């Protein structure tokens, strides 16, 4: 087969550790933008991202070179660094699990 095509959409839900409402409205947009940049820089495509103070929903068109778990591990690690580096919250971290 000369050409192969696939298209996989995954809906992720990632929650703040212990579901604490730490994602504040004044920096929520910055966090969503940063998460989008992480996803898109890894050859995936963020379709939509939104959430509340204790979790984020992300719909992603996945590239075939990366697994969902690899992507979410990177998103959680890098976005936690972003929040702490920018001093947006000192208690912030994600739960280890995520919901596909």
Image: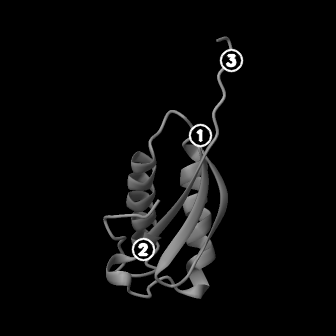
Question: Toward the viewer: 98 or 90?
Answer: 98
Residue pushed farthest top? 2
Residue occupied by mark 3: 3
Q: Residues under labels 1 and 2: Cα distance?
A: 24 Å
Q: Earlier in the sequence, mark 2 or mark 3?
A: 3
Question: Toward the viewer: 76 or 90?
Answer: 76
Q: Residue at x 44, y 85 (%)?
A: 22
Q: Residues under labels 1 and 3: Cα distance?
A: 19 Å
Q: Residues within 10 Å of mark 3 (few under 14, many from 20)?
A: few
Image quarter for residue 4? top right
SS of the residue under disc 2: strand
* Of labels 2 and 3, the one closer to you: 3
* Of labels 1 and 3, the one closer to you: 3
Q: Residue at x 44, y 42 (%)?
A: 67
SS of the residue under disc 3: loop
Q: Up-down: is 63 above or below 45?
A: above
Residue occupied by mark 1: 43
Q: Residues under labels 2 and 3: Cα distance?
A: 38 Å
Q: Residues within 10 Å of mark 2 (few under 14, many from 20)?
A: many
Question: Toward the viewer: 3 or 55?
Answer: 3
Task: Tell me whether circle 2 and circle 3 mark residues in contact (CB < 8 Å).
Answer: no
SS of the residue under disc 1: loop
> Residue 76: horizontal and vertical position, in percent?
41, 61
The N terminus appears in which quarter of the rendering?
Answer: top right
> Residue 23: horizontal and vertical position, in percent?
49, 82
Q: Residue at x 40, y 76 (%)?
A: 16
> Residue 71: horizontal and vertical position, in percent?
45, 49
Residue occupied by mark 2: 15
Q: Earlier in the sequence, mark 1 or mark 3?
A: 3
Total numbered badges shown on the rendered structure: 3
């Amino acid at each position: 087969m000369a050409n192969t095509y696939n298209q996989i959409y995954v809906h992720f839900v990632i929650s703040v550790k212990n579901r604490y409402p730490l994602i504040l409205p004044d920096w929520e947009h910055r966090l969503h933008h940063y998460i989008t940049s992480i996803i898109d820089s890894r050859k995936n495509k963020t379709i939509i991202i939104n959430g509340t103070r204790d979790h984020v929903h992300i719909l992603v068109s996945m590239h075939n070179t990366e697994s969902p778990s690899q992507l979410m591990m990177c998103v959680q690690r890098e976005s936690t660094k972003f929040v702490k580096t920018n001093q947006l919250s000192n208690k912030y971290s994600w739960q280890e699990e995520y919901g596909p």
